[in-house]
Image (tube, grey):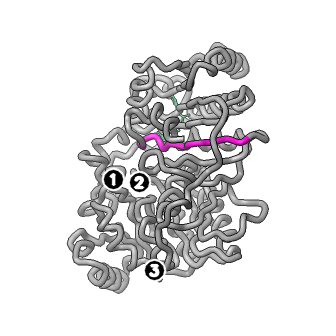
């Protein structure tokens, strides 16, 4: 078996989001959690390797990404896609820039693009500035992100700060003019010693105009949006039925460790509808052991699961998160909550949960790792960027949806289960 497209995603929800867009456009996709140690199913068009490298030290993110690259090339991948968040989650140290440059070097290529645009989810790039809905990235909730606060919306500047290569821009007027103008601009950028181009895109039509110009690039980088046009580059058309999963069973639960505005709204919506909720305050871990708190959460869940979906959340306002971080430390608070929620996921499966939503990229990574899931089948989309997936966890069938913090409508936590 030889795959066409090999993808490396820097977090788990992002990997699912990308796989979702490829499946919707006709590709047969497997998502591997980490670098697979064994063979994958035959007859695949693409493999998405989900790393948890977004918030690692740049050297570690680069090392993991290169290992994933080696694996994908060994599977025959003709093109590599490095997927990051449509809100360009990174810091001046990286990891989008360092990983992109390392992959370029390993593939021996001197040009690639970077476009996080994902119009279906309100992420657009114009004149190099990233918008989240109607707001500049730097004025959106992303400015308060616990791990990667985004305070500059100018992606040329943001990417340049992370790169040794020169970063340029393919502007909207070229994108609008079509493939020929885009290719011409690429040639112009290359000849003026610019190796990485941020590409403007505001609508899906823009992404479909850009896609054919990427056919011969060994490496593409971006959000999942640009992936919608890639299957056609390999002669693959969208077809229904590629997203069918086995029937769902078992109790329903939601774990939320995302503190984004979007997730906080979803938590409020679920509460307002009278859903059963357990709020986890990380500061409690100063007084109680993780084991004690876990026991309390699972005892509460056991009492409520038969009545409908339960929500266990540490999601909190930016002010509360800042207080927790100032007392526990940023990384320490993040790790403590992730560790706890991973253990909660294990406990819930053992209580008979067969349908699980997880909100938060890092949180999803922690839960998937704790559940020992190494492969997922991608199913029906719930909201843009979030499909239901199917996996085997702790020897039981599990329907799982991994939601990036910023994704989903306010009623996501209730609607998602109706779609199964
Ligand atoms: P998102 O997808 O919204 O970025 P993530 O799960 O990736 O969500 O990131 C949220 C981070 O914040 C995680 O590391 C999580 O453990 C941490 N976290 C969750 N709740 C709290 C809280 N109440 N205080 C501080 N940090 C928190």
**Residue sitting nearer the eye, 237 or 395:** 237
Name the residue carrying label 3: 215
**Residue sitting nearer the eye, 148 or 220:** 220
Name the residue carrying label 1: 123
Name the residue carrying label 2: 86
Q: Is mark 1 within 8 Å of ligand 1?
A: no
Q: Which residues are magenta?
A: 397-407
| Percent coordinates x, y for residue 157 in the rendering | 33, 60
Magenta residues, dominant SS class: strand
Of helix, strand and loop, which one carries label 3?
loop
Residue in the image at 63% along x and 31% along y: 341
Magenta stretch contains residue 255 = no
**Side (left or right) of 251 relative to 130:** right
Q: Is mark 3 within 8 Å of ligand 1?
A: no
The answer to whether the residues at label 1 and label 2 have Cβ atoms under 8 Å apart is yes
Q: Relative to 28, is 235 above or below?
A: below
- The quadrant of the image that shows the C terminus is top right
N-terminal label among 2 and 3: 2
């Amino acid at each position: 078996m030889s795959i066409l497209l090999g993808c490396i995603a820097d977090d788990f929800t992002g990997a699912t989001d990308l796989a979702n867009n490829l499946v919707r456009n006709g590709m047969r996709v497997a998502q591997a959690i980490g670098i697979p140690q064994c063979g994958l199913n035959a007859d695949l068009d693409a493999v998405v390797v989900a790393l948890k490298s977004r918030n690692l030290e740049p050297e570690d993110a680069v090392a993991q990404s290169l290992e994933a690259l080696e694996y994908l090339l060994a599977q025959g991948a003709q093109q590599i896609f490095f997927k990051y968040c449509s809100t360009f989650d990174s810091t001046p140290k990286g990891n989008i820039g360092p990983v992109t440059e390392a992959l370029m070097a390993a593939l021996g290529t001197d040009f690639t693009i970077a476009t996080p645009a994902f119009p279906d989810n309100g992420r657009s790039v114009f004149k190099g500035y990233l918008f989240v809905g109607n707001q500049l990235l730097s004025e959106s909730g992303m400015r308060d992100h616990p791990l990667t606060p985004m305070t500059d919306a100018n992606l040329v500047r943001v990417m340049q700060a992370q790169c040794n290569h020169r970063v340029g821009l393919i502007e909207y007027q070229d994108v609008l003019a079509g493939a020929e103008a885009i290719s011409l601009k690429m040639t112009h950028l290359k000849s003026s010693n610019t190796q990485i181009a941020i590409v403007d895109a505001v609508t899906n039509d823009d992404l479909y105009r850009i896609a054919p110009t990427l056919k011969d690039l060994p490496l593409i980088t971006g959000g999942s949006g640009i992936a919608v046009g890639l299957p056609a580059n390999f002669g693959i058309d969208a077809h229904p039925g590629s997203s069918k999963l086995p029937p769902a069973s078992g109790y329903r639960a939601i774990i939320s460790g995302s503190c984004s505005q979007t997730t906080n709204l979803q938590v409020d919506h679920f509460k307002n509808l009278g859903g059963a909720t357990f709020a986890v305050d990380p500061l409690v871990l100063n007084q109680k052991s993780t084991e004690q708190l876990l026991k309390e959460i699972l005892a509460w869940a056991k009492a409520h699961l038969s009545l409908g979906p339960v929500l266990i959340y540490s999601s909190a306002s930016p002010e509360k998160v800042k207080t927790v971080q100032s007392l526990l430390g940023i990384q320490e608070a993040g790790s403590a909550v992730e560790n706890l929620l991973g253990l909660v996921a294990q406990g819930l499966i053992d209580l008979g949960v067969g349908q699980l939503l997880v909100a938060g990229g890092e949180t999803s990574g922690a839960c998937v790792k704790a559940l020992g899931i190494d492969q997922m089948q991608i199913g029906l989309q719930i909201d843009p960027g979030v499909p239901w997936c199917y996996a085997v966890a702790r020897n039981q069938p599990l329907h799982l949806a991994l939601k990036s913090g910023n994704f989903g409508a306010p009623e996501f936590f209730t609607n998602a289960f109706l779609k199964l």
